[in-house]
Structure formats: structure tokens, C-alpha cells
Image (spheres, rainbow, N blue to C red):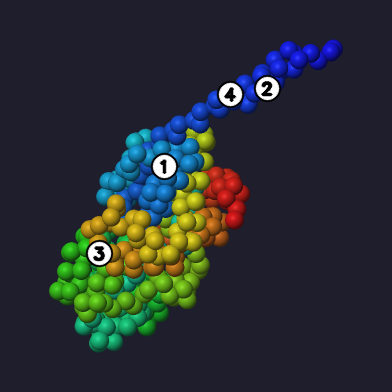
Amino acid sequence: MTLTRRRFLTAAGAALAVGRATPARAQAPKPITVAHSVSTFVYGQHLVAREKKFFEEEGVAVPSFIVPGGGAKVVQALAAGQAMFALGDSNHPLKITEKGKEALMLFATDTRCSYANVVVRKELFDRGVKSVEALGDAKLVGRKAVVAATAIGSGTYVYGVYVLKGIKAADGTPVNEHVEWVSGGASTTMLGGLKAGKFDAIMAVPEWQWAAEEEDFGRAIFDVQDEKAWTRVFGGPIPVTVGYALRETLEKSPDLAQGYVNACYRAQQWIHRAKDDEIVELLHKPYMDTFSRDVVLRSVKYYKTIFDWDFMIDEASYANGMKVWVPLAVDKPVPYAKAVDMTFVKKARTKFKS
């Protein structure tokens, strides 16, 4: 066929028209519901993912978080379908599974429990109670030591009992047999009770430990930042804080689950690379302005020492955790294969390999 001038111009015009065609519009992010108990840096992955717009970039939208003020309420919200994804204590998805609705851990954000610190009142410390072993010495304490968790059955209680069971008193029996556990409540009553001598020791989040030491009415006798002390009791890393979802959510909406995990993984990698001050600048005003900037900065530095940068939950760390969770948090062991799904985080790690 002879290429006439008219045919050439027609063909060229068609080609130009194709080149100028409006590209397909990018799909709008799909909304998801996401929960955690309180907006502090222990759940920094959620906060960073939202502030840095990683959720939207991964195809999902989180207009606001569900923040009910307690882990048990987060469990209820997820089990009832009010939240699709949650970040919280690793025994929470196990409890949901135990009650007949399967829930799965999708990733772990840390390797040690930040509220397994044992802080003794200063008077006892000065008297010689400078270790967990000594807490089981009635002669030193003057009676059975009174130890406060936030509530009987809470996370602080579960990890506290495990620490005290794993360490032996001078007579060779577990320290836990020599103490009386009580409910201490929240910050004001826990610290007030220790200060007033109502409690001999408390299970403490980092902020309580710092307050007791700075105000000189308490001293840590078990500090989770001491890796040697942690390993002696727990045997190694534990996936303490995990992202989780119902199995039905993962099966019905795998694209949304992948978007959620991708965003959280990206947030963890950003936290890993970012300067501490940069993290505080991003999160302090929107989420933690009830704390001073210095406290938030200290919290960031603290959690960076126990965060799990690869997000993976392997069978060994899961087994370490199961020893803690059964029977105080859940009645029977849940097999790793039934409790953990690493497919989403493996895809995220592949996609964002640096």
C-alpha cells in the first residue's frame, strides 16, 4: 500500500491522540477500620503510617483510629467487626481464637515486653531487696511482699507472674510463691501505692519506672532492657505486640490486609532510620501532647531498643511466648500454624527491600 501524505497525516494524528489520551485515574484508597488501645509510642507504627500517609500510598485509608483505652476493648471491637485490624498484645488474637473466631497474628513490632519491669519501693531496696530473688525473702521484706499489677489477669499480671515464677528464692522455690498479687489500677494509684508503702513492688511500664526512680521512691530490680536478665527468664525474644485480624477478614479482603501490613512495615522502617527528634516532631502534638516532649523523646529512645525491625514471628519466639501465655492468658496452647500468618509481611519485605 502506497503511503500518501493524507494517510501519513491521519496515522500520525491517531498516534498523537493516543499519546495525549487521559491516563486512567488512580483508584481511591479503600477505607479500613484500625484499632489500638492508647495513642502512645508502643503503637508508633500505626501513628507513623497515618502521619506519613503510608496507608493511602498502599491503597487503604484510615480517617481515624479506634482508641478505646484498653486492650480488652480492642479485642471486643475486632471480634465484633467494628475494627478490621488491630495492634495489641499477642495473647489477644489467641483469646479470640479460643472463643471460636479464628484470629491471626500478621507481624510483631517488638521482641520484649515493655511492662515486665519490676520496681520495688526504695525503702526495701535500701534494706537489701535489690533483686527479684530477694523479693521472696520474708525476713528482708518483713512479710509476704505485696506486688501490684494493673489488674489481676492483665498483661502486667501475666508477665509479672511469669518473671516471679521463673526466678527462685533463696529456699529454691519460685519467688511467686512468696508474694501476694493485688490490683493497682492506672498510673496515679500504682505510683501512689508504691510511694505510700501500700505496695512493696509494682509491674511498671517505662514511664512509671522513670517516675519512681526520678522521684526517688522506687528502684528497678528487673529491667527488660537488660538483655541478659530478660533471656534468663524468657529464653529469648517474644512477639509481645502484634498486628492481628480475623481470618475471615484476611480471606475476604486480602488486598486490604496487604495494604495495612505494607503501611505498618514501611512505618517501622521509617522509625528505624529516622532521628529520634524527627519522630517526636511527627507524633508529639497529634497524639501525645499530654506528655512533655522530653518524656516522648525518652519513650522513642526506649522502644527503639526493643522494637522488632524485621516484623517477623518465627516458631522459636512464638514458643517462648506460649510459655508465658498458657495458662494465665489462654487455657491451652494454640499451634503456630493456626495462630500466625507471615505471608503478608513476607510480601511487604520483598516489596520494600532496601
User: According to the image, label 2 marks what residue?
Assistant: 15
How far separated are the C-alphas under marks 2 and 3? 62 Å
| Label 1: which secondary element | strand
Q: Quadrant of residue 314?
A: bottom right
In this view, the residue in front, 59 or 39, is 59
User: According to the image, label 3 marks what residue?
Assistant: 292
**Where does the image place residue 199, in percent across and percent down from the top left?**
20, 71
In this view, the residue in front, 10 or 65, is 10
Q: Earlier in the sequence, mark 3 or mark 4?
A: 4
User: According to the image, label 4 marks what residue?
Assistant: 21
User: According to the image, label 1 marks what residue?
Assistant: 85
Which residue type does callout 1 highlight? Phe
Which residue type does callout 4 highlight? Ala
How far separated are the C-alphas under marks 4 and 2? 10 Å
Q: Residues within 10 Å of mark 4 (few under 14, many from 20)?
A: few
Q: Quadrant of the N terminus?
A: top right
| Label 2: which secondary element | helix
How far separated are the C-alphas under marks 3 and 1? 30 Å
Q: Earlier in the sequence, mark 2 or mark 3?
A: 2
User: Farthest residue toward the right?
Assistant: 1
In this view, the residue in front, 179 or 101, is 101
